[in-house]
Image (tube, rainbow, N blue to C red):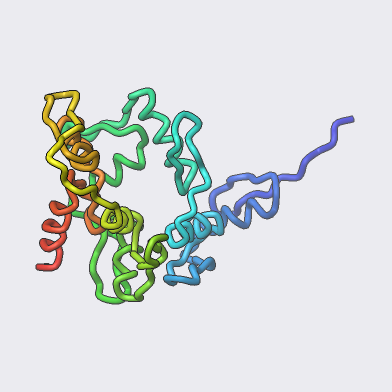
Amino acid sequence: RERSHKLFTCEQCGKSCARKGDLKTHMLSHSEERPHVCGRCGTTFKHPAKLKQHERLHTGEKPYQCELCPKRFRVQMSLAAHQYTHSGEKPFKCNMCPKAFSVRNNLKKHKMIHTGEKPYRCSHCGKGCRLLQHLVVHERGHTGERPYACDACGKGYTNQSALKTHRATHREKPPKTGVEPYGCKACGKQFNDKSNLAKHVRIHTGEKPFECEHCQKGFRLLQHLSSHRLTHQKH
């Protein structure tokens, strides 16, 4: 004789859940209640799982790693999106420009560039941000939080991109000898140290490792990023 399973049904929409806890979680979708609060910035969430994901913005934790490369991610969905980069598939296309994306949520974020939508508002100054992670980084300017510390000197930064830029200042440059032993394989140009060659190669590869923490625009050289940052100070 088969055992019958009791279902818990939502009185508002009729959805059935196998467990009472699942129904309780579902009921939050019908209310404005957001009982789960971030202890660092005060952002509220309906579900504890969303709070846990958000807290990783503060801690820098990235528990999901790609099996095909060393990259790690804060949420599983980002890992799933990244895996498309290995296959090259981008099924979600913007209807306002030629850009395409591997996941629907990235397309949604991209469209805000066209619409000007900035749904995340700073609780300190009222500035609007397009993405939640942009808001978190921005609010650290008000709170003084610097979760990313340099392991060489201890200086703290609001985000990983700024820390990466700073770390480059600790690299030692070898003395000039008049000999230029490092040659570019693409064009043959010679350099006296490996770091200058690496900067030059980015012209051929298009790599832009220095990212602005305000707008996520990438730059080939650190000095270009430094000049760009001044444009944000004008606003």
Q: Could you tell me residue 77's position as x and y percent?
A: 45, 41
| Identity of the residue drawn at 30% across and 57% down | 170
The quarter of the image holding the N terminus is: top right
- Using the image as rendered, state which of residue 3 and residue 89 is in the foreground: 89
Asked if residue 64 is positioned above or below residue 139 in the image, the reply reads above
| Identity of the residue drawn at 32% across and 53% down | 164
- Using the image as rendered, state which of residue 18 and residue 184 is in the foreground: 184
| Identity of the residue drawn at 41% across and 65% down | 147
> Left of 1 or right of it: where is 18?
left
Q: Could you tell me residue 4's position as x and y percent?
A: 81, 38
Q: Is residue 114 visible?
A: no
Asked if residue 179 is positioned above or below residue 15 in the image, the reply reads above
Q: Could you tell me residue 235's position as x and y percent?
A: 12, 68
Asked if residue 133 is positioned above or below residue 85 in the image, the reply reads below
| Identity of the residue drawn at 17% across and 39% down | 192
> Left of 210 or right of it: where is 19?
right
> Left of 168 or right of it: where is 30?
right
Q: Is residue 59 visible?
A: yes
